[in-house]
Amino acid sequence: MTGLARLIRTGRDDFARDHWGRGPLLSTADELCGGGFDSLLDEDAVDELLTTRGLRTPFVRVAKGGRTLPERSFTGPAGVGASITDQVRDDELARLFADGHTVVMQALHRTWEPVMRLVQELSDDLAHPVQANAYITPPQSTGFSAHYDVHDVFVLQISGEKRWRIHAPVLVDPLRTEPWDQRGDAVAEQATGEPALEATMRPGDVLYLPRGWLHSATALGGTSTHLTLGVHTWQGGHVLDALVDHARRAVADDPRVRASLPLGVDLGDPHALSGTLDHVRDALVRAVQEVPDDVLAQSLLGRSHGSRRAAPVAPLRTARDLAALEQDPTGWVLRRRDHLGAVLHGGVLRSRAGTVTVADDDSACVTRLLDEGVVPAGDLGVDLARRLVLAGLATPDRAA
């Protein structure tokens, strides 16, 4: 069981209809039957990341009672041989944690492989970008007061217990430009009312919250760790941005739009602008209506590729294996790089690895690799195999 199915107690269709972007869903460990999330991140992993991985800000934050500490209070120089002044100091973190501060480990999908794998699976299932942060809270402490996020979240309780209070939004579907602190008074007032959901989360429990829903959590008993998967949903506003961008470029080529306004024009006088304004408005409306659907879709696909990462590639092993394959392709296969989001259309392959032109003679082989996932290197030929590997589309591997 992977991806979304690991995180919800309902079926996918029921979740999409009743909860996605609509309202909270709490799934207990018993309902999920997944055995918890220790394999993703345990306390030993947290200590390893904070002490031996050379983390820098903003990969770590520290907070208490709704206040985030300045970075200088827990970072310092890295020592001889590196001009790094913002490396995390584990001794300061130990002191702050003992004093009741929450440690926030950000972007774990970039620094911890088990979390990276889950994030990639969930991104594929949802077709929306996902990030991961961990919150390690001392006993009886609240890291952040009631607030809302501008992205959906899945909260995975790793260890310990947290008491969560959930309230309905003060702003439905907030955008990234509408953070909660712009409505601090309304948030604080809403949080004093009867919660829509109040529950103690225990290891293995998962809570889904759409963006905008107010939440706060207090650790109970011992140290509590939860992992938050933030889902940065694609919205109609992204379609609007892409549509307007294409239309604006088309209108910009209009000679009348490119021409200078009259000498001495009063930009604050609508009558002085009326002729130009009418022409630009009409041209923009026509341009919006004329943007081809497929062009708009390709633009959005490009934005999607830039928001997520394909599976990691090991540079040294790949170079070594590619050299061996070139010497003798017998016994070698090419494996499609996972999470590429690759689409081959009109001789152009677009993916998270970039854009690659594919010759007509190679289209069938490339399509086979994308569809089947594994192709014998001998079937592709050394030259094509090399190009696919160096383009980041595939990795060489010994045949089973």
Image (spheres, rainbow, N blue to C red):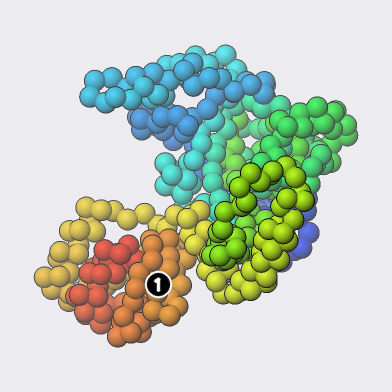
Q: Is residue 363 positioned above or below 111 on the image?
A: below
Which residue occupies the foreground of this view, 37 or 398? 398
Which residue occupies the foreground of this view, 339 or 208? 339
Question: From this viewpoint, is residue 62 visible?
Answer: yes
The quarter of the image holding the N terminus is: bottom right
Q: Horizontal and vertical percent for residue 50?
A: 42, 28
Question: From this viewpoint, is residue 122 visible?
Answer: no
Q: Horizontal and vertical percent for residue 171?
A: 79, 42
Residue found farthest to the left: 327
Residue found farthest to the front: 263
Question: Residue at left 88%, top 31%?
Answer: 193
Q: Horizontal and vertical percent for residue 229?
A: 58, 46
Instruction: Name the residue carrying label 1.
Output: 349
**Residue 255 in which image quadrant:** bottom right
**Residue 242 in which image quadrant:** bottom right
Which residue occupies the foreground of this view, 74 or 360? 360
